[in-house]
Image: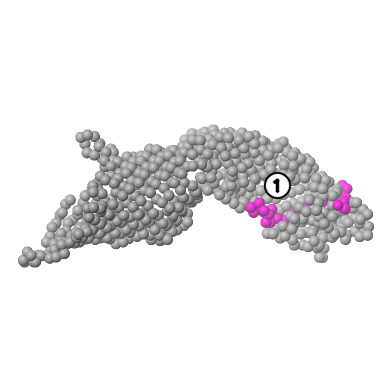
Amino acid sequence: MRIWGLMLLTWSLPLCAMTEISLSADSISSDLFQLDKPHAVLNLQAQQQVQVHADRLQLGDARLDNPNIRLDMGTRPTLLVTSDQLQMQPYQVRQPKIFLDLRPQTRQPVLSFYAEVKALQDEVWGTFHLNCQVPAQAALQPWRCEDGLYHDVRSHVPFNVLVTPTWKDANKSGPAARGVDLELAVREARFSDASGLHAGDKLTGKVNLSAHEQAGGWRWQGVFQWQQGELFWQPFYFAEGNKRFEIRGFYRQPYADIEQATLELQGVGTLHSQSRINLISKEFEFLKVDAKEVDFNGVYQAFIQPLIPHSAFGHLHVSGKADWSFEAKGLQPLKFHLNITDASVEDQAGKFGFSHFNADIPWDYDHPRQIAMGYQSGHILKIPLGEARWQAEVDRFSITAPRLQLPILDGGLDFQDISAAWINQSMVWHVKMDLQPISMSSFSQALGWPVMRGQIAGMIPLVTYANHELRMVGDMQFKLFNGMVGMSDLDIDDPLGAVPKLHANFTMREIDLGEITRTFNFGSISGKLEGDIKDLRLQNWKPVSMDAFVRTADGPFEKKISQRAVENITALGGEGTAAALQRTFLRFFKEFGYEKIGLSCQLRGDICKMGGVEPLPDGFVIVKGKGAPSVNVNGYTQYVSWKDVLGRMQRVTDSNSKIIIE
């Protein structure tokens, strides 16, 4: 302790008339604190009180501005330290009070702390208080701090603290090293922040930390035990306790070395990590994490699903085991390795699934690596997938593969020239595809459709994905019902997002109407069908806009329609649609001649503007008859909801239509 100045402020001529003594100094310091420019006043008339004022009081990293210290040396001595504010990043502290009650010798003194506290970025002030029993030998014996509480309008955190000074002999002749053991116990705590992104409820747990000086730094270790309660830390949610985190390391300014950290998560497994942190720059010098035989479902639910809740992979049932490791320097990843063993993945909505899935995925920032993955079986919607294996080369942030064959029913998809890269925080890729012939019989049965004949086959010259947009370059053609169905201008915005948007154009040419009507038990229509669906737009895979028209093609082929087909077309037209012939004789004929058949829909939102092959003053012609006997079908309700159109199609294909023929 140094006292740079001593000054007598008041002195009465008779010594017995002295009323007070004032002392001042530039600073008073010890290992525990530093007091700048203290000014003490001893009242000689009230000998039981000493008042001390100072510019600041430094206690470790905490600083009290303009502290006032009052020492009362009566029968129950007390010490009170107050200030307007306490500087302690990253918190704001006002009206701090430190009160020492020096009780009679039969009981231990009590040191109490009280303050109003808030985080710098928060607007809510809370109160903090803690009572500590002061041991007789403060530097050697445990400090028991009880009844601790932090409380504000969003949080209530009761806690107890046990601080035990420890001394370890550096050697027999040298000085002892300082050390401390700390135990923090929290019970039934709740908290939340202003944004609602971090919250906890009924949290109970314990933290044990110990540290001692060694080689110019501090050797430390800790155990964190979460026993019960719920924790939400956007986007992660943990609803059960029984989690344990062990950590040990060494601190020497400015580095904190985490030599070993072990996290045990019930239902997941055990994770190990090592790292070095620069406490000045707040950056990782390096980081290593590894886990063996972790539960794939636990990893998915705890760490993967919260990151992608609204994507196509946000609601899965998964199983299996996984090993993984990760290394980084600073913010730059260096190495990664994921090995998944005999896993299964199933979308809860039944969109896709894979069984006996295995993957070996290494990655190295400096060297290319070969990855391999595959599955024994799977499905997309209700279409089964055969066994598939895939190998590729990953080179830093790009991946390439010459070919991937995906068996589907009795055919398959053949992907070629696969290339993908991570550029500007987004994935970019392209691929060519050949659809090997798949029988329509097996395809339609897999989807639960009426059995169709023929094959579906085609080729896509190029599919690209960039800026969350999938685009098809060129046209894709399918052979169907002895004709051709083509798709062009395919564009899907955010295909894996919560609300994907699709745009495409479709054409139909030379479709055999006899094949279609026999397949769907529609009745009999001979001839050829053609049609276009222009500017089809889907939102979340539901139509919101299109211009669609189907019609019979011109040509020198027979054009006949059965009475059953007339009835079903009339049902498709809906209320206000009528079939007309010489009404008396209609029931005596099984089929009729026609000149042309057609139906159109201009969809905008949920409203479809219906049309046919020709307009009428108060409607439109769907079937225009020709010859004898012939039949005309006219529609008179022009605007209908898309839901009603789909309902009519369903009723017709279910053969449940009830119609009136005039």
Q: Position of residue 450 (x, y in %)?
A: 77, 45
Q: Which residue occupies 43% across, 59% down?
A: 154
User: Extreme front residue here?
Assistant: 106
Horizontal side of 163 relative to 469 (left or right) equals: left
Q: Which residue occupies 26% across, 49% down?
A: 135
Q: Which residue occupies 17% across, 61% down?
A: 48
Magenta span of residues: 535-564
Judge by depth and name the residue closer to the eye, 345 or 536: 345
Residue 31 sits above or below residue 215 on the image: below
Find numbered disc 1 in the image and state the secondary structure of the residue it sits on: strand
Q: Is residue 327 magenta?
A: no
Judge by depth and name the residue closer to the eye, 71 or 594: 71
Q: Amino acid at mark 1?
A: Met
Residue 631 in view, yes or no = yes
Residue 534 sits above or below residue 423 on the image: below
Sort mark 1 into few (<14), some (14-19) or many (20+) by Cα contacts within 10 Å.
Answer: some
Instruction: For the C terminus, give its image quadrant.
Output: bottom right
Judge by depth and name the residue closer to the eye, 365 or 606: 606
Residue 313 sits above or below residue 637 on the image: above
Q: Which residue occupies 52% across, 39% down?
A: 295
- Specify the quadrant of the image occupied by residue 385: top right
Residue beneath disc 1: 487
Judge by depth and name the residue closer to the eye, 389 or 105: 105
Horizontal side of 555 relative to 314 (left or right) equals: right
Main SS, magenta region, reads strand
Horizontal side of 632 relative to 423 (left or right) equals: right
Residue 255 in view, yes or no = no
Q: Position of residue 210 (x, y in %)?
A: 33, 42
Q: Position of residue 56 (x, y in %)?
A: 25, 57
Residue 44 sits above or below residue 271 on the image: below
Q: Is residue 538 magenta?
A: yes
Q: Position of residue 130 (x, y in %)?
A: 33, 55
